[in-house]
Image (cartoon, rainbow, N blue to C red):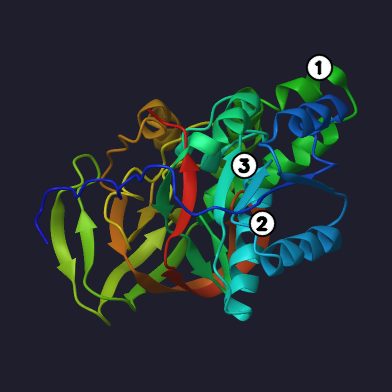
Amino acid sequence: MPATLRQHAPITAPSAREGRVAVILNKNAKRVGKRVRRQVEAIAPAGADVFFTESLEQARFITRRVVDSGYATVVTGGGDGTVANTMAQVVAHAEARALPVPRFAVLKLGTGNAVADFLGARDYREDLAELPQARFRPMHLVNVEGTRTPFAGFGWDAHILNNYDRMRKAAERFFLSRALFKTVGGYLVAGLGKSVPELMVRQPSWGVRVINTGGIGLEVDSISGQVVRRIAPGATAFEGRIRLACFGTTPFYGFKFNIMPFADKRPGLMHLRLVDMNPMSAVKRLPAAWQGRLDHPGVTDLQLGAARLEFDGPAPFQVAGDAAGERTSLDIAVDGPIECATFAD
């Protein structure tokens, strides 16, 4: 493989495949109130069926019925956890029934909107109205413990997200604080105001070994993305101490935080970023990191098709921005691509 970056996966013109459209949204989501629901029903493409779910069980039932009924496109929206969960359930049920996997469209109706931003989502009303003319591009997911997700992470990021989630729930009691925690400001408050001081005191880190369980893997330069090392199948790709590890096939962590800038540069490979950096250095480099230009001796960037991560102790874990407990080991692998609507120019 040449050292230069490969172009993004191709974007296709509107598919000739005809079929029904299912819009599946969580009725309890904060940004899916009565007004939004009325607008979605009014703007949805002609012939589309709109479902507002009220529980995980109901969402699971609807996604299975949608797959069984042969819908061609599933529209979802909300937080990245909701989007990832909908995609995972649809793909898993389609595979189990040996049925075609529907295409997806993601509306910008969450707080972080990592997947929506990656796919170029704009105002949900505009995207719904233009869905029949939308272009589609392949997007890989990562198989994690039998489910799929666009991104996940260990260590500091999971710690900060856990704090953000706790603070966001507490902020729901007051209008002003509730509004703050629906913006990037709330994430910064949780990170800089609470998590960084905690991390400075505790200085947690984890020893980790990363084994390449896929094909040829790559270590790349953190700024240019140029290949600096090729990693043989079965070889140890990394061994050392880290304070953060994140991986995914989409670059953003929400609010367009470009923490994995090489996630979609080579189809079939995820970006695994391993970071060993003290809290003050991390804060100092936050603006550069936000724009995908994190440069520090403690940053290791890998592109792998599959890997096994083995930690020396329980590490906090998050999946698509949702807390997922702790892990001491994990097997991850890039799945085949799904088709997603893109509204980017």
Q: Could you say which is closer to the camera, residue 104 or residue 185?
A: 104
Above or below residue 247? Residue 285 is above
Image position of 2 (left or right of 163): left
Q: Disc 1 to disc 3, how far (Cα)?
A: 25 Å
Q: Which residue in the rendered view is the most extreme toward the left?
A: 2
The residue shown at (40%, 53%) is: 138
Residue receiving disc 2: 86
- Contact, CB < 8 Å: mark 1 with mark 3? no
Assign a secondary structure to mark 3.
helix
- Spatial distance from mark 2 to mark 3, Cα to Cα? 34 Å
Q: Residue furthest right?
A: 173
Which label belongs to residue 176? 1
Q: Amino acid at mark 3?
A: Glu
Discs 2/3, front: 2
The answer to which of marks 2 and 3 sits earlier in the sequence is 2
The image quadrant where one finds the N terminus is bottom left
Residue at far bottom of view: 234
Residue 254 appearing in the image:
no
In the rendered image, is residue 252 in sight?
yes
The residue beneath circle 3 is: 198
